[in-house]
Amino acid sequence: MTFDIPRRLHVGHIHTPAQPRVTIVLLHGIGNAAASWQHVERALPADTRVIALDLLGFGQSPKPMRASYNVRVQARSVMRTLLSMGLYHNVILVGHSMGALISIDIARRYPWLVRGLVLCSPPIYRTARQKKRRLVNAEALLTRAYTSTATDAAKKPKLYIQLAKITKATGLTSPAFQVDSSTIHPYITALKASIVNQTAWRDIQRLHKPTHIIYSQFDPFVVNKNIIQLAHQPHITAQKVLALHEVTSPYIQPIRQAIDRLIT
């Protein structure tokens, strides 16, 4: 049994000018924390309020054992945190990976809050029904791999904690990436509840907010054809960068440009 009570999240970083034009909320990917946005924060407009949150289960935010860690409870926790700070409108959501899926859910649930979205490396997958045929190719491989990883990690948590350390040491993840004894359970649970079992493909198309997707054709976790198809929607634009899955330097200028367009 799960208990999905929205929690107040830890605010990892905040920049507040005297008269901010908008509020930019940065939502990290699975296994990461607010610190993963530090290199991006420095490039954002000086006259905007910038808030980087540790999502539920990660960083210094609460890690309840009986939470489902799906996008719904994450979205509600983000909303509770923003309301506690007196923020209830004119927000630009910038989400990476799982944070992008959470951003979509926030915009769906609380449209009055959101001015626009910037989604980096969003792992948006269609179900077999949405594809009108059997799930095949990249989406099938990815969802099966995630499910297998989550199941195996639950049985061998120490092994996966060690593998996470090795992966981080190779530079394949953000320096803020951390899967340890305190985050392995949220990581496993979020992988299944937020990424494998998602409704982002349907939800993003129903939004009425300007949305810019930044992705890489070399990202092993993003299905490029889905992004290309979504970009045919009138409120969605997409842009390719030369990078992998993490938000590295090639993402910074496109993020800044997308935010500038949303502000003006």
Image (cartoon, grey):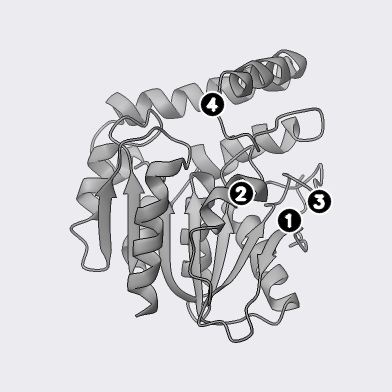
110 left or right of 82 in image: left
Point out residue 185 in the picture as x, y percentages from the top left corner.
74, 33
Measuring 22% from the left and 55% from the top, which residue is drawn there? 231
Q: Give the alpha-carbon distance from disc 3 to disc 1, as whole Å.
A: 12 Å
Element at label 2: loop
Q: Amino acid at mark 3?
A: Pro
Q: Amino acid at mark 2?
A: Asn
Q: Give the alpha-carbon distance from disc 4 to disc 1, as whole Å.
A: 22 Å
182 left or right of 4 in image: right
Of 147 and 53, which appears nearest the observer?
A: 53
Q: Give the alpha-carbon distance from disc 2 to disc 1, as whole Å.
A: 9 Å
Sequence order check, earlier mark of 2 and 1: 1
Of 8 and 143, which appears nearest the observer?
A: 8
Sequence order check, earlier mark of 3 and 1: 1
Q: Which mark is residue 70?
A: 2
Q: Which mark is residue 62?
A: 3
Dots 4, 3 in contact, CB < 8 A: no
Q: Amino acid at mark 1?
A: Asp
Q: Amino acid at mark 4?
A: Thr
Give the quarter of the image for residue 221.
Answer: top left
Element at label 1: loop
Q: Which residue is mark 4?
A: 147
Sequence order check, earlier mark of 2 and 3: 3
